Structure formats: structure tokens, C-alpha cells
């Protein structure tokens, strides 16, 4: 996506009363990078709050639970953070319900969350590229859980076909060329 097309898209989204952007895709597809880029280039003074589904995903087997929580996070502007070290619920987190919100992460786009969002973006990338990126980023922490997580992603994709709910599909492999 070019900077100029990104600016045009952001201006349209930012005009909503309370913009909500969802970014979904497989692990390592570039969701966090895009979310940071969108927040940095946001065209209004109301800086978006960026939340990753990992923040409220209850562990390595929790993708479906996290996906089901996205509409609640949008509606209530709060969630309980997951403490990955203690493997238990952590502290409550309260968001400003008036500020724009970007939720990125595996499971962000479902039929229920899409109804509440201004814009939904699907990040499409081949598994080999995603695995390489994810393991470069999270290394030994993610490596033993890659297959377990990939199976949950596949179930999420089969159940909701999130790319079909997206307003924009970004082909990460094509953009990398």
C-alpha cells in the first residue's frame, strides 16, 4: 500500500464518529506493523489506541476465546489483560471510548466484530514467510507453539472466512517483491 493511498483511506475512516479498525491475518503477516503505521499516520489529533488480541488471549489455546472477546472490547472499551508469564488473567485495562481504536491480531475479524468496525483489513501472506517472521520476532517463545497456533488459525479461517469480511486485503508477499 502506498503512503498516499494509506492517507486517503485513513481520512475516510477517521471521519467516523468513533473509528474502529480491525486487522487480522496469520501470525507473522504484518498486522502489528500495519497497526503501528496506521496509528502513526492517523490524520486527526485523536491518536488511535492500538490493542493486540494477544493482550486478552487466554494462552496458547485461546484464539477462539480472544476472537469472541473482540466485540466486547469494542463495545465496552475495556478488557482484562492476559498475563502470559503467570498464565492467568492479569489487570483490567480501560480504553477511552471516545478515541479511535485499532484492534490487530489473529481472530480480530469475525462477523460479530465486523458489524462494529469502520474498516477491516486482512493481511494475506504465505505460511513460510509468516513462520520466518514470527520466529524471528518471538523465537524460542513461539517455536514450540507454532503448530498448535496454526491449527487454531485454520479453524478461525474455516469458520469465519475473515478475508471475505474485510474491506481491504493486503497481499504481503506481493508487497514484499
Image: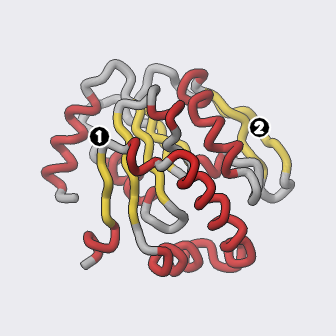
- Asked if residue 9 is positioned above or below residue 144 in the image, the reply reads above
Expressed as whole percent of the image width and height from the top left, the position of residue 53 reads 60, 47
Residue at the image position 38 percent from the left and 35 percent from the top = 47
Q: How many marks?
A: 2
Q: Residues within 10 Å of mark 2 (few under 14, many from 20)?
A: few
Residue 135 in which image quadrant: bottom right
Expressed as whole percent of the image width and height from the top left, the position of residue 14 reads 28, 30
Q: Is residue 145 left or right of residue 6?
A: right
| Residue pointed to by mark 2 | 91
Residue 117 in which image quadrant: top left
Q: Secondary structure at mark 1?
A: loop
Q: Is residue 28 left or right of residue 176?
A: right
Marks 1/2: CA–CA distance: 28 Å
Residue at the image position 31 percent from the left and 42 percent from the top = 167
Query: Cβ–Cβ below 8 Å for labels 1 and 2?
Result: no
Task: Report the quarter where the N terminus lies.
Answer: bottom left
Q: Secondary structure at mark 2?
A: strand
Residue at the image position 53 percent from the left and 31 percent from the top = 112
- Asked if residue 38 is positioned above or below residue 32 in the image, the reply reads above
- Looking at marks 1 and 2 on the same chain, the residue that comes earlier in the sequence is marked by 1
| Residue pointed to by mark 1 | 42
Front-most of residues 136 and 129: 129
Q: Residues within 10 Å of mark 1 (few under 14, many from 20)?
A: many
Expressed as whole percent of the image width and height from the top left, the position of residue 13 reads 27, 32
Amino acid at each position: 500500500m502506498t503512503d498516499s493511498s494509506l492517507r486517503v483511506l485513513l481520512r475516510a475512516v477517521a471521519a467516523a464518529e468513533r473509528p474502529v479498525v480491525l486487522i487480522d491475518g496469520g501470525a507473522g503477516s504484518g498486522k502489528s506493523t500495519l497497526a503501528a503505521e496506521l496509528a502513526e499516520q492517523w490524520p486527526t489529533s485523536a491518536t488511535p489506541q492500538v490493542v493486540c488480541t494477544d493482550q486478552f488471549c487466554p494462552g496458547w489455546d485461546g484464539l477462539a476465546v480472544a476472537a469472541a472477546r473482540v466485540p466486547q472490547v469494542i463495545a465496552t472499551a475495556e478488557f482484562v489483560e492476559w498475563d502470559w508469564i503467570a498464565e492467568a488473567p492479569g489487570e483490567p485495562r480501560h480504553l477511552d471510548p471516545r478515541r479511535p481504536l485499532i484492534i490487530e491480531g489473529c481472530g480480530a475479524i469475525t462477523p460479530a466484530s465486523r458489524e462494529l468496525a469502520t474498516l477491516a483489513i486482512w493481511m494475506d501472506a504465505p505460511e513460510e514467510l509468516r513462520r520466518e517472521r514470527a520466529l524471528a520476532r518471538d523465537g524460542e517463545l513461539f517455536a514450540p507453539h507454532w503448530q498448535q497456533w496454526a491449527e487454531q488459525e485454520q479453524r478461525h479461517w474455516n469458520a469465519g472466512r475473515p478475508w471475505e469480511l474485510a474491506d481491504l486485503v493486503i497481499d504481503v508477499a506481493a508487497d514484499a517483491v
